[in-house]
Image (tube, coloured by chain):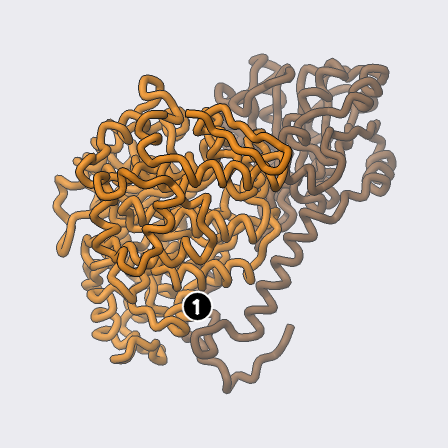
Chain colours: A brown, B orange
Amino acid sequence: MHNDDKTLIQANPWDELRSHTNARIALGRVGSSLPTREVLKFGLAHAQARDAVHRPLDFTHLKHELHAEGFRTLHVHSNAQDRQTYLLRPDYGRQLHDESRIYLEHALPAPELAVVICDGLSSIAAQRHSLPLLKAFRERFSTDWANTPVVIAEQGRVAIGDGIAVALRARLLIVLIGERPGLSSPDSLGIYLTYQPAHGSMDSQRNCISNVRPEGLPYAQAALKLDYLARESLRLQLSGVSLKDDSNQLKISP
Amino acid sequence: MLYQTAVGALQYRFVDLKTLLAKASPARSGDYLAGLAAATYEERMAAKIILADVPLKQFLQEALIPYELDEVSRLIIDTHDKAAFAPISHLTVGDLRDWMLLDSTDSQALAAVTAGITPEMAAAVSKLMRNQDLILVAKKCRVVTAFRNTIGLPGHLSVRLQPNHPTDDVRGIAASLLDGLLYGSGDATVGINPASDSLSTLMRLWQMLDEVREHFDIPMQSCVLTHVTTQIQAIAAGAPIDLVFQSIAGTEKTNSSFGVNLALLREAHDAAQSLKRGTVGNNLMYFETGQGSALSAGGHHDVDQQTCEARAYAVAREFKPLLVNTVVGFIGPEYLYDGKQIIRAGLEDHFCGKLLGLPMGCDVCYTNHAEADQDDMDTLLTLFGAAGINFIMGIPGADDIMLNYQSTSFHDALYLRSVLGLKRAPEFDAWLAKMAITDTTGQLREIGRGHHLLQQLPFISGAA
């Protein structure tokens, strides 16, 4: 990063307060304005957030990685044919494309659980964090993993999982999706759990775990929460507002 | 009334006023998403041409959302002031634009007709106005409000200091608050968007803000932006609440999706008034609005998003607020796609609000999935300065680490003051000078390590 000529900048003698917040405080000023260094830092963070939204998910690579770890994968598309349509028409991103639906209906049905990985608004999040999260979850949650489908959905929003789960006759749906990127968090992964999903399932029927990434909610903790919610959901036969996350009362085993 | 015209060989006809308004609205993604936007450029112009000839009186005959169905419609009709309307009652929508732009139509003339203008009339005329018209007329509308300081005086600009923290950490919030005060921000309000909705956490925030204010004797007002029912609860529990915040919208159905209605807002307003905390005035409501919220809640009744937004101002003006903030780019690209749409919507909201007599400010902002960047914010910010906006947001480095979006910064406010010579609320300005944060001309001074605020603020209210 650019090294400012310090004599040009009015520094702020409260930079030690940065230990209490990630907010951009004590930036200093040149006249009324930001020093060059800070303009560049902000610009870089914004560039990374923009790339997270617009860089396409590398499906081939992700599929390869999932196979190498023994997961069974399927590949589908939403009704949003490109990123611009995806951004303008959230409804299209929620719909499973007809060809994909037929393809899934002819595939081996889900034994219990269907996992869906969506690019969402941050392909970087899905690319980086879905596999490590899934591996951590597999270690805790016992199901017929060899036959459990992991469906990679292109240009998908959370509700595309409903159509996928219906086509695969899954009882429990877990959607991993890239969240809307922030300036300081371009790669947050969101997890949505729905019991017995159907077309038109409401958000209130889902449980959400947010900000999954090493700097946010680490994989192990996210997997612990997800395992708790998944087991409770199957036991109580429900999900959403009536399923409370009491996993924080559990301890992470070393 | 028939809404039709011919353009060349093509006959354009619109079934009702609501459809005409939607088709005449400048292009934006939310109206396309709703299936309400004009299909062609020519159809949009045909709608504008027809709209220009619609008499203002027609808006009193033809409700966009039926009176029986919607309490906002009832509020608009029931509070319409016929005497105030009289001077413009013979005009069409197109005439209203011309009349407002006349040099002879000054601040007093505009203020005199405010109570006679309905939100739908304001929305309609805005659709015929270019950006420069929206700026010129808004600048003539002066709306001055007061609580512990005076906001909206000509040649002045205030800033809402927004010291958010993702876990409501009091030390983190205090750090951003200090940063903002030392940059001369905070005269509109210090308003925290909390992450939590637990009453005990929120009580700490109200107490901390009040302790800071009292300790340094700052002529400012504070606010914690939680649901209005929680604020009513907190007032009953003895919280030192200055301003009552609530998000509002232009239809009953949308408001009910926010968990509010007019009666509840009145209850909150009255509860806060009973505390009598204002010193130079008693405007104490802080409302936030934004185009697209009605469609997002499925409460738009096929009314275009800009007209829905203007109707929210009818709700706001019922409570004589201190501040109304249109959070213009927060909602995302499916409602306002890019910088152009965000800039246009911001200017429309500011104009409509001011014409309806509201103390308008704007959260000049965008999300990372919108086609916009800080350059677009600079443009809108500068246009707002020219239009005489009452207040903008001040967020450290323009980056809200709790709500994950970009707005305007303390530096941005300094920039706008510098290029347009805009002053802070006078009481707050005097305090800054007294604290040696600014010099006699209002310019920031160099702050040394030994500064009073720097020495003490981080240690207030368990903040350290």
Residue at x-position 50% and y-position 53%: B343
Report x, y in % for residue A207.
56, 27
Chain of the residue under the numbered disc 1 shown in the image: B
Residue at x-position 23% and y-position 28%: B78
Quarter where residue B172 is shown: bottom left
Residue A4 in sight here: yes
Q: Secondary structure at mark 1?
A: helix
Residue at x-position 56% and y-position 24%: A206
Report x, y in % for residue B457.
30, 64
Identity of the residue furthest to the bottom in this view:
A7
The crowd level at tag 1 (other Cα within 10 Å; few <14, some 14-19, many 20+) is many
Report x, y in % for residue A139.
72, 31
Residue B80 appears left or right of B248: left
Query: Which quadrant is the C terminus of chain B positioned in?
Result: bottom left
From the viewer's perspective, is residue B425 above or below residue B80?
below
Q: Which residue is mark 1?
A: B411
Residue at x-position 23% and y-position 52%: B109
Report x, y in % for residue A183.
57, 54
Query: Which quadrant is the N terminus of chain B positioned in?
Result: top left
Tag count in the figure? Answer: 1
Circle 1: residue type: His
Q: Nearer the viewer, residue A67 or B78?
A: B78
Identity of the residue furthest to the front in this view:
B9
Residue B311 in sight here: no
Q: Nearer the viewer, residue A112 or B50?
A: B50
